[in-house]
Image (cartoon, grey):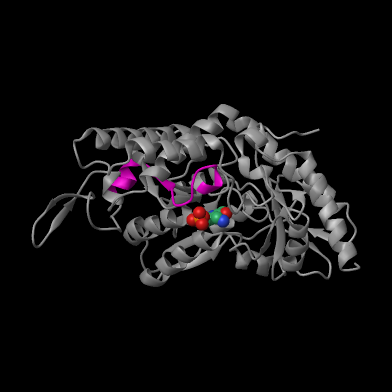
Amino acid sequence: MTKPLVDVSRDFPILNRTINGHRLVWLDSAATSQKPTAVLKAVERYYEESNANVLRSVHTLASEATEEFNAARAKVAGFIGANRPEEVIFTRGTTEGLNLVARGFGDQVVHGGDEIVLSPMEHHSNLIPWQQLARRQGATLRYIQLAPDGTISLEALEQAITPKTRIVALSRISNVLGTINPIREAADLVHRHGGYLIVDGAQSVPHEPTRVEELGADFLAFSGHKMCAPTGIGALWGKHALLDQMEPVIFGGEMISYVDREEATWAEIPAKFEGGTPNIAGAIGLGAAVDYLNQVGMEAIFEHSRSLGEKAFQVLQGIDGVSVYGPASPHAGAVAFNIDGIHPHDVAQVFDAQGVAIRAGHHCAQPLMQWLGVGSTARASFYLYNGDEDIERLKEAILETKRYFRR
Ligand code: PMP
């Protein structure tokens, strides 16, 4: 029996809600996670006691806010095993981080005739910035061939990554299939050819212990809101030397060293990439989320997400008329499925009537839907506050949906 890893009713008040007469079952954490009280309190306390702009004024509140903001950066750096806090750039989330790299770094290293390697399972935010870069520079996009079960083999990596590859952009964990991609192997290959690896960690950083050096990435982007932090905050980690080399993309206050009427020079990293007033409360909330996740333990969270994902896969596969996508294992948190003859949006609607929240649609991964040969899917995703009981509710919801549509 797998129980939630935390005291759900104490830590996640929102999960005490009743939806349409049923206890809310939150199976949409891959879209966004719920936020523990510790995070909500940290944000509230900041606004109640220390609210001020950071890195500017010398008064007491400004020093407190700056200290907390810097402490949050150090916590995030520690969480992913970064060597130095300044390698962590605060962003709005994964999308902004990947766009920053494609613009500020991609334009420097990718030129006409070069190749950018992607996988067909990428989220649009790890796809479109590279399409745009390829168009700007006259480069070619190449796609890693997926195995029939949706995984990426070493042979497929070897076929896709060549001496022409300048950038490989790959998600560590798929937001649709929950599969785990061989990032270390991709890093070794692309580095051998003198290229760079950019990792979309939107689904992996919340679910598995992350050590950037072991991962082998040159850049890693992720979002706070999928790891118990508020929306509007995320981080881009990059190797120090590459961030030094990378051009800023957002110009304005706080990112400069010197400005005259004609020219400007840039501040050191991370400030160089953080023009304008940052999301201070969000960063502090992210710091609190990191503390919370560390307390639970990332190893335990990984085992938990994986065990629930794989159990759900088995249960769904055992229901007549249900198609489940991807391999039986691994499923780190997310499982995509369809019920024969019923549109996923209708599935999600009937689920909602039973208090079960899932996502239906293309999951911002249309090329993956094309590869699967479907327009859309339903998706159940799990996190530290879910347990076996929620899988039971998922199963009941499917049976009820089938009865409702007489399938
Ligand atoms: N990549 C993946 C794999 C994701 O799951 C998501 C969020 N669904 C993103 C990128 C984009 O994250 P955000 O919307 O927080 O920028």
From where the camera sits, is residue 201 visible? Answer: no
- Where does the N terminus fall, quadrant-wise? top right
Q: Is residue 243 magenta?
A: yes
* Residue 286 sits above or below residue 252 on the image: above
Q: Position of residue 236 (x, y in %)?
A: 41, 47
Q: Residue at x 60, y 54 (%)?
A: 31
Q: Position of residue 107 (x, y in %)?
A: 34, 62
Rendering quarter of residue 372: bottom right
The foreground one among 10 and 123 is: 10
Q: Position of residue 376 (x, y in %)?
A: 69, 67
Q: Residue at x 56, y 27 (%)?
A: 295
Q: Residue at x 61, y 67 (%)?
A: 367
The foreground one among 338 and 69 is: 69
Rendering quarter of residue 37: top right
Specify whether 53 is left or right of 361.
left
Q: Is residue 406 magenta?
A: no
Q: Which residues are magenta?
A: 225-245
- Where does the C terminus fall, quadrant-wise? bottom right
Specify whether 113 is left or right of 349.
left
Q: Furthest-top residue in view?
A: 295
